[in-house]
């Protein structure tokens, strides 16, 4: 009886998360093949198995932390397609006063043309190094 | 009161609540209140969300009425890239002209406000009455009321998505709006080139930046790059029209997220895109979203009007691939069952 009650309580507590996929912490850096970091942009992983999207902002040193449901909860386990997206706007409303570093080629911004892929392991921390060709 | 009077007349105690009884009653009442108050707040939030969705529906209908008149949806704004088009129209004022909310005014019972607008003049040349006229249907009650939806001139350092702050600039004041046009996805690119999505005609959404058809100081205001229902190749029920924009708390009522919205110069005050690299914001503090992201102040969902005029809620965890399919009107990916 007691266990029935406990299990009902438990399912009430955790039931809300039923449709969520388990995620595992991921961080890393995005670098060009010559070793310089990508200075601005967004990195995104799409799980091939689950279809979930994990994304993170790229910092000036190329580092990032990924989140799927919350900003830093990581990504689902398994293989992922990867895109690296930069939005550089020059419509005259802002002047660019800072060095963006090398631009990320356009093809890395689209799942159809970005050939990048990574694997996320079900472990407490994944450290990824993403390498982009500047051409 | 009755008990205290009795005590004074008779000189001895009458039956009364003990301290324990009083404390128990207070405890029970406070427990009941603690159950009730969040319930009331939830109902109020739900009511605001419904009102917010209702406004979206109105905007969707207005866009269709506009379409009935002009054979196309209104442009998000007018912008000209002379190098790209070779269309030099002299002293073009295109970038400083009105944005899509102004074009919808006559279809939202706001003809009196629209009549204050001079279509041959720039935003800065409009009367304060025209610029500062906040309208309830443009506002989501969960975010702003009409009385707080006008912002004064603002001296601001705008930080672009590239992370680079530009110099101090003055953004002229005006009324804000809490809805953003679907400008498409990032597929045209944003690489500092004439093909970038924000130039006229490049957007893959429904209300996009368009090129003016001539110098509006002299000719009848008209625009190229007209997007009509026939151009929404993925189907109007599979394409976003207008939605709720992501607005971080520190940029509330401020450019480039939520500044004066009738002013065509600052695209992200009235438009958004969605897709890979531009996810839906999970909350107003979501660092993964940026000034181009859709997002809402409701938990877990962002509300949209689709191009067929219907309303739809989309979960914030929707994959960016599906979001991109919904934002792009002609990618051949109808994205059913989202």
Image (cartoon, coloured by chain):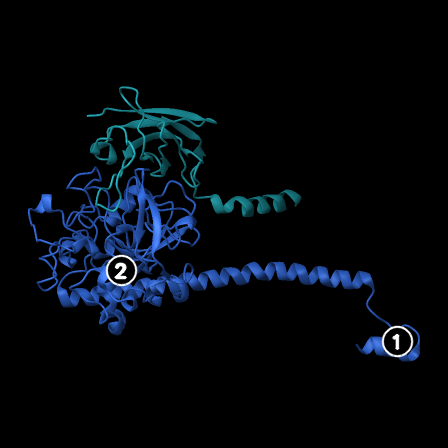
Label placed on residue B223: none
Residue B163: quarter of image? top left
Residue pictured at 22% horizontal, 35% vertical: A112
Query: In this view of the protein, can residue B308 be seen by the observer?
Result: no
Residue B232 lies, in percent from the top left, at 17, 54
In this rendering, the answer to whether A122 lies above or below B190 is above
Q: Is residue B243 visible?
A: yes
Residue visible at 63% across and 42% down in the picture:
A3
What is the spatial separation of the Cα atoms under label 2 and label 1, in whole angstroms? 71 Å
Q: Label 2, on which residue? A: B262
Residue B303 in which image quadrant: bottom left
Q: Residues within 10 Å of mark 1 (few under 14, many from 20)?
A: few
Chain ID at mark 2: B
Q: Look at mark 1 in the image and give the residue it sits on.
A: B7
Taking depth in this image into account, of B133 and B328 the one nearest to the observer is B133
Circle 2 crowding by C-alpha within 10 Å: few under 14, some 14–19, many from 20: many
Q: In the figure, the blue chain has which letter? A: B
Residue A88 or residue B168, whichever sits in front: B168
User: What number of labels is visible?
Assistant: 2
SS of the residue under disc 1: helix
Asked whether disc 2 touches disc 1, contact meaning CB atoms under 8 Å apart, the reply is no
- Chain A: give its colour: cyan
Where's residue B64, x and y in %? 21, 65
Instruction: Name the chain under label 1.
Output: B
Taking the image as shown, residue A10 lies to the left or right of residue B239, namely right
Toward the bottom, the furthest residue is: B9
A91 or A25, which lies in front? Answer: A91
């Amino acid at each position: 009886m007691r266990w029935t009650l406990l299990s009902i309580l438990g399912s009430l507590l955790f039931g809300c998360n039923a449709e969520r996929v388990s995620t595992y912490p991921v961080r890393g850096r995005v670098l060009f093949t010559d070793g310089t970091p990508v200075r601005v942009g967004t990195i995104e992983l799409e799980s091939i198995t689950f279809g979930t999207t994990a994304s993170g902002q790229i910092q000036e040193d190329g580092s990032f932390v990924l989140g799927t449901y919350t900003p830093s909860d990581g990504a689902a386990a398994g293989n992922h397609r990867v895109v690296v997206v930069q939005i550089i706007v020059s419509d005259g409303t802002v002047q660019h006063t800072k060095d963006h570093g090398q631009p990320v080629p356009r093809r890395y911004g689209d799942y159809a043309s970005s050939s990048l892929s990574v694997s996320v392991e079900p472990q407490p921390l994944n450290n990824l190094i993403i390498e982009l060709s500047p051409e | 009161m009755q008990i205290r009077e009795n005590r004074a007349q008779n000189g001895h105690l009458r039956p009364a609540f003990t301290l324990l009884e009083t404390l128990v009653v207070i405890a029970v009442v406070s427990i009941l209140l603690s159950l009730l108050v969040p319930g009331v707040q939830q109902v109020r939030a739900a009511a605001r969300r419904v009102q917010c969705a209702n406004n979206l529906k109105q905007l969707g209908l207005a866009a269709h009425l506009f379409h009935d008149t002009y054979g196309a949806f209104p442009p998000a704004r007018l912008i000209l890239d002379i190098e790209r088009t070779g269309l030099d129209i002299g002293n073009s004022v295109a970038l400083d002209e009105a944005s899509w909310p102004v074009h919808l005014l006559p279809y939202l019972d706001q003809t009196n406000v629209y009549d204050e607008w001079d279509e041959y003049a720039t935003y800065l040349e409009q009367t304060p009455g025209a610029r500062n006229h906040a309208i309830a249907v443009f506002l989501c009650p969960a975010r702003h009321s009409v009385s707080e939806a006008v912002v004064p001139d603002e001296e601001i350092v705008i930080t672009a998505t590239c992370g680079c702050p530009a110099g101090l600039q003055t953004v002229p004041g005006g009324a804000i709006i809490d809805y953003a046009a679907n400008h498409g996805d990032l597929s045209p690119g944003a690489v500092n080139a004439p093909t970038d999505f924000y130039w006229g005609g490049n957007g893959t959404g429904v209300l996009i930046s368009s090129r003016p058809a001539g110098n509006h100081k002299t000719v009848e205001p008209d625009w190229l790059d007209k997007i009509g229902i026939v151009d929404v190749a993925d189907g109007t029920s599979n394409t976003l029209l207008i939605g709720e924009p992501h607005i971080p708390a520190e940029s509330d009522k401020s450019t480039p997220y939520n500044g004066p919205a009738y002013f065509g110069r600052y695209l992200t005050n009235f438009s958004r895109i969605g897709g890979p690299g531009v996810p839906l914001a999970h909350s107003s503090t979501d660092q993964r979203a940026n000034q181009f992201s859709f997002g809402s102040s409701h938990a877990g969902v962002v509300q949209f009007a689709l191009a067929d005029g219907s309303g739809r809620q989309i979960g914030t965890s929707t994959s960016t691939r599906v979001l991109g399919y919904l934002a792009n009107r002609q990618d051949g990916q109808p994205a059913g069952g989202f």
